[in-house]
Image (cartoon, rainbow, N blue to C red):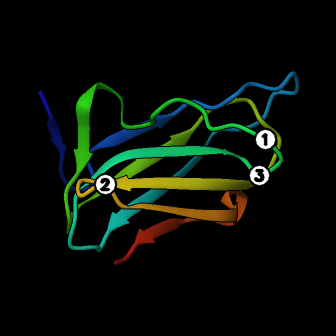
Amino acid sequence: MNTIIKGGAAALVLLGSALPVAAEDVYFTLYNESNRSLHYFYASPSNSSSWGPDLLRGGHTLRAGYNGTVTIADDSTECYYDFKFIMGDGSETVRNEINICDLGSYTIYD
């Protein structure tokens, strides 16, 4: 069963690999300005060699034209993260070294 995340009231909780040093949670708005629904979203510190779990857990999707609030609460002190997006049509996009410490929003385009 897929749940559609609508509008700014939606919240996506991102959980990555925890490091021993505590850090503040990071929040930003994720805009899907592509023509496809986002089905899987992964984020991990850029210095990590593996992806964490799917951040749109529970079968959630972010439909084209919608947005949601993302929370990264993994206790990492890293600012640079890699993002991996897998769309409904199976296409994948990876964006490296996104500075989440200065990120107010991120937009997915075609």
Front residue of 68 and 84: 84
In the rendered structure, are the residues bearing label 3 and label 1 in contact, judged by CB atoms less than 8 Å apart? yes
Residue 96 locus on image (x, y percent):
68, 63
Where residue 48 is drawn, which disc sits there? 1
Residue 17: percent from left, percent from top: 70, 28
Quadrant in which the N terminus appears? top left
Badge 3 local density, few (<14 within 10 Å), some, or many (20+)? some
Mark in front: 3 vs 2 = 2
Residue highlighted by disc 3: 46
User: As drawn, is 67 to the left or to the right of 41?
Assistant: left
- Please name whichever residue, 83 or 76, is drawn nearer the observer in this view of the structure: 83
Whether 7 is drawn above or below 51: the answer is below
Name the residue located 77 percent from the left edge and 52 percent from the top edge: 46
Label count reads 3
Q: Residue furthest bottom?
A: 110
The part of the image, by quadrant, that contains residue 3 is top left
Give the amino acid type for the residue marked by disc 3 in the picture.
Ser
Q: Are marks 3 and 2 in contact (CB under 8 Å)?
A: no
Q: Earlier in the sequence, mark 3 or mark 2?
A: 3
From this view, report whether residue 97 is shown above or below residue 2.
below
Residue 21 point in image, percent of width and height: 88, 27
- The residue where tag 2 is placed is 90
**What secondary structure is found at the residue carrying circle 2?**
loop
Residue type at tag 1: Ser
Q: CA distance from mark 3 to mark 1?
A: 5 Å
Res. 73 mark: none
Residue visible at 24% across and 45% down? Answer: 61
* Image quadrant assignment for residue 48: top right
Identify the amino acid type marked 2.
Answer: Gly
- Of callouts 2 and 1, the N-terminal one: 1
